Image: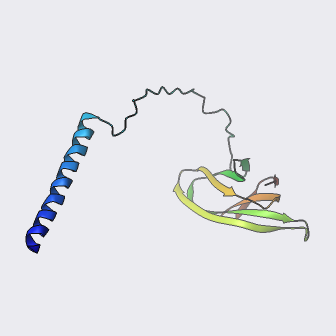
Amino acid sequence: MKSRSLVASVGGTALRLLIAAAAVAAAYLTGATLTDEPSRTLTLSAQSIPAENGLIALAPGRVSVGELTDCSYRVSSAVESGAVAYEWTLQRFSARSGVWQDYLSTTGGFDGAGRTVDWHVRVPGNPGTYRAILDVSGDRTMSEKFQVTC
């Protein structure tokens, strides 16, 4: 008796799965939805903006810092072509000791044509005066100092 009930149970489960799969496939092929909500038409629009607006043309030897949202900053610089290894360092000025101290750093590199390199850095809960440094093969370039208030 156990073997008959087991076969019937497995057979019933397989049949239910087959019916459910067929129903999902039919709904997918006919474009039907599984909700009772009516479909809505959504119209999107976009405005064309010239690429030059709001961008700063960077030249090698200059580091720019732009403030983003949520205590984040975008640090950028142009780097000339070749096999390049670079290191970004964010330094914080210590009013107590009167010196710049390394706060965060990261490395990167590329091989090929010159390009703009970016670093997105977040500084939450540590207000103070900062500067960013880009070191490309021993050639260091510093940003202007900037104030973090969050």
Classify 115 as above or below 110: above
Residue 59 is situated, as x and y percent measured from the top left of the image, at 69, 46
For the point 11% across and 63% down, the residue is: 8
Q: Nearer the viewer, residue 9 or 69?
A: 9
Where, by quadrant of the figure, is residue 53 drawn?
top right
Q: Nearer the viewer, residue 94 or 17?
A: 17
Where, by quadrant of the figure, is residue 143 drawn?
bottom right
Does residue 93 appear to the left or right of 2 in the view shown?
Answer: right
For the point 60% across and 29% down, the residue is: 50
Does residue 86 appear to the left or right of 132 in the view shown?
Answer: left
Q: Nearer the viewer, residue 62 or 96?
A: 96
Count of labels in the image: 0
Residue 61 is situated, as x and y percent measured from the top left of the image, at 72, 52
Q: Is residue 105 visible?
A: yes
For the point 68% across and 65% down, the residue is: 105
Q: Is residue 137 visible?
A: no
Position of the C terminus, as image quadrant, is: bottom right
Specify the farthest residue to the front: 1
Position of the N terminus, as image quadrant, is: bottom left
Q: How is the image coloured?
A: rainbow
Residue 111 is situated, as x and y percent measured from the top left of the image, at 52, 58
Does residue 117 appear to the left or right of 142 in the view shown?
Answer: left
Classify 44 as above or below 124: above
For the point 77% across and 60% down, the residue is: 125
Residue 16 is situated, as x and y percent measured from the top left of the image, at 19, 54
